[in-house]
Amino acid sequence: NVTVTGYIMPSANVTYDIGSGTTWWRTFYGISTQAKYADLAENYSGDADYDAGTVLIFGGDSEVTTTTVDHDPRVAGIVSTNPAHLMNGGLTGPNVVKLGLTGRLPCKVKGPVSKGDVLVTSNIRGVARPITNSKFIPGCVVGKALEEISTDEIKTIEVVVGRF
């Protein structure tokens, strides 16, 4: 046992790790933490190796895959770049996907789209698009746009993912 009074301080920001990818601490007890990144993600088994920003659904041969179904209610989340917190970290397999479940994430979106637009799956594999209200199906929402796309191009923009 080690007892510390005061602080344990690194000599500079982002210079040391606690544990490693193969040796973990068992339990952390604390009051609060702060993260540089902005999403909560969980590892899932994917049908393929997907780029960050790809919209995925529950289904396929593994747990998650892409879709070409517009307004697909099976939407699961967006492939994360650097999650602030990653759950199910021990998952192994050929295509482990960090799936962003909530928070801010980069997302592939087909424009035009305005800030605040509700986004859903599109008929383009792995790409979101603005919702058509008359086609709404409960569970089909991917998130809300934080950026605009003025053309009909596919761009990667910041999106807020949550249960809207």
Image (tube, grey):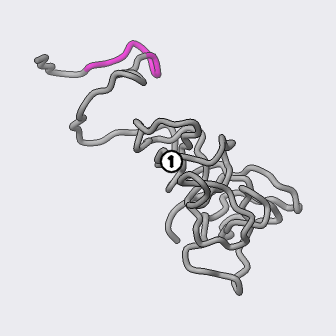
- Residue at the limit of the structure toward the bottom, as seen here: 134
- Residue at the limit of the structure toward the front, as seen here: 61
Q: Which residue is pictured at 53% across the width and 50% down the height?
A: 100
Q: Is residue 24 left or right of residue 36?
A: left
Q: Which residue is pictured at 47% across the width and 36% down the height?
A: 92
Q: Position of residue 1 (x, y in %)?
A: 11, 18
Could you tell me which secondary element the residue under label 1 belongs to? strand
Q: How many residues crowd mark 1 within 10 Å: few (<14), some (14–19), many (20+)?
A: many
Give the amino acid type for the residue marked by disc 1 in the picture.
Tyr
Q: How many marks?
A: 1
Q: Position of residue 81 (x, y in %)?
A: 60, 40
User: For residue 13: magenta?
Assistant: yes
The segment highlighted magenta reads 8-15
Q: Which residue is pictured at 65% across the width and 71% down the height?
A: 72
Q: Position of residue 21 (x, y in %)?
A: 42, 24
Determine which quarter of the picture holds residue 135: bottom right
Q: Position of residue 85 (x, y in %)?
A: 43, 42
102 or 49: nearer the viewer: 49
Q: Which residue is pictured at 78% across the width and 66% down the height?
A: 123
Question: Is 99 situated above or below 57?
Answer: above
Magenta region, mostly helix, strand or loop? loop
Q: Is residue 106 left or right of residue 102?
A: right
22 or 62: nearer the viewer: 62
Q: Which residue is mark 1?
A: 44
User: For residue 86: magenta?
Assistant: no
